[in-house]
Image (cartoon, rainbow, N blue to C red):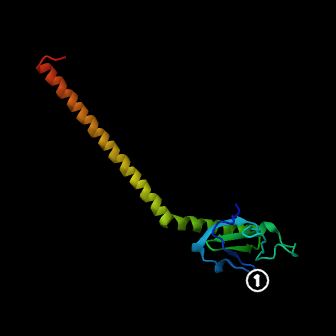
Amino acid sequence: MWVSKDERVLMIRNDKGPRFPMEIDTSTIIRLQDGHGTPVWESHTSGCCCFGGNNNIDPSICFSICTSDETVDLRAESLQAKQAYYEALEAFISIRKSTTGEFIESQRKAMEEKQAQKEIQERDEKKQLIAKKYSEKRAMLGKKYNVS
């Protein structure tokens, strides 16, 4: 999935120096994506020299990490290394999301919905009990005064 222009990706590292995953603040990672050329601006410059004159790089080992403020283009040593890095980062991202406010907020909403449904059920049970008592009382009064 490509990042659209209106998302919070503000810049692309456009110097041609090497990029290392350790340089990235993992708490800001939004998504991982295959390849480079993320169309954040009309013209894209790659941080890994995959475009331009260097055609010796296999594009299948290239990937980008989108953070809350930039897109960082990276290149793995091999396809297996790329897959291992993806799996590790995806696991980290899902664990982080489960411990952040998003998860807590969703749990709070679920608890509120459960509580609201419980209150509705209790209210309905009270109404049914009142209706039952009313009909029993009416039946008793009807028998007492011979009213059908």
Which image quadrant for residue 82? bottom right
Q: Is residue 129 left or right of residue 70?
A: left
As displayed, is residue 77 above or below residue 109? below
Percent coordinates x, y for residue 144 in the rendering: 11, 20
Percent coordinates x, y for residue 8 in the rendering: 63, 69
Label 1 Cα crowd, 10 Å radius (few <14 / some 14-19 / many 20+): few
As displayed, is residue 62 above or below residue 16? above
As displayed, is residue 91 above or below residue 113? below
- Foreground: 131 or 16? 131
Percent coordinates x, y for residue 146 in the rendering: 13, 16
The amino acid beneath tag 1 is Gly
Residue picked out by circle 1 = 17
The structure residue drawn at horizontal position 77% and vertical position 72%, both measured from the top left corner, is: 44
Percent coordinates x, y for residue 74 in the rendering: 73, 74
- Foreground: 40 or 59? 40
- Foreground: 86 or 45? 45
The quarter in which the N terminus is drawn is bottom right
- Foreground: 58 or 66? 66
The structure residue drawn at horizontal position 35% and vertical position 47%, both measured from the top left corner, is: 118
The quarter in which the C terminus is drawn is top left
The structure residue drawn at horizontal position 43% and vertical position 56%, both measured from the top left corner, is: 109
